Amino acid sequence: MPVLNVVAVYLAAGSSKRMGSNKLLLPLGNECLGSKALQAAVCSKVNHTIVVTKKGDNLEWIEPILFSEAYQQKWSHISCSSALKGQSASLKCGLQKAKELSADAVIVLLADQPLISIVLINTFVSLFENHSSVPFISSFYQGIAGAPVLFSKQMFPSLDKLQGDQGARKIIRQNGTENGIFYECSDASLFMDVDTKQAYERIKKIYKEKCRRI
């Protein structure tokens, strides 16, 4: 079986309007919230991770260790000049870079989902390695599809047509839910995103509880 090139597109270009401040800089444990899922991606089985930000982001939310020699070849950064047009613009910026890297698939990760784990990302990569003909592999929780989601290269033209805040769910609906793979996970915290101060407080409590179990 040929080795498949799976590239992560890490979307970190949001405006944090509902939070009122840059949520990627919020502390979670001893690190910044925005760096958590990025570290999981860089340490996972994906071949490369593309970090997409808006213009002017100085990446101070990324942990210093990821700039070290051990990790610097595992990820790259793109400043998306059209990020304010919506999430689809950031996704397409990352997708263009993934194409340049000859990606067989992209896995879309959100920087405000800090509890995404290495295990979950690796599960998606393994599923694609075993089912490389499927157009997509999507997270699924309580009947709702969402991120993380993996798209094979056959779906790249559809992703390029997205506009505004259209995202993965639109592509999945258009392609037909029966054609992809849905990975259902019972741990809701893996898919929680931080959009508000209330959500941030919930994430902090869940994170502390997870750390106690380790």
Image (tube, rainbow, N blue to C red):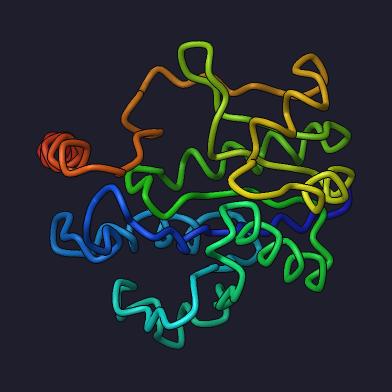
Residue drawn at x 68%, y 67% as measured from the top left = 93
Give the percent coordinates (x, y) of residue 192: 34, 34
Residue drawn at x 43%, y 58% as measured from the top left = 14
Among the 4 quarters of the image, the one containing residue 65: bottom left
Apparent side of residue 5 relative to residue 11 in the rendered image (left or right)? right
Residue drawn at x 45%, y 88% as measured from the top left = 69
Among the 4 quarters of the image, the one containing residue 31: bottom left
Against 138, is 116 above or below?
A: below
Against 49, is 76 above or below?
A: below
Viewer-proximal residue among 187 and 25: 25
Quadrant where the C terminus is found in the figure: top left
Viewer-proximal residue among 117 and 2: 117
Residue drawn at x 74%, y 38% as measured from the top left = 128
Apparent side of residue 37 relative to residue 125 in the rendered image (left or right)? left
Give the percent coordinates (x, y) of residue 162: 74, 47
Against 29, is 187 above or below?
A: above
Give the percent coordinates (x, y) of residue 26: 19, 60
- The answer to whether any part of residue 159 appears in the image is yes
Apparent side of residue 192 relative to residue 97 in the rendered image (left or right)? left
Viewer-proximal residue among 176 and 136: 176
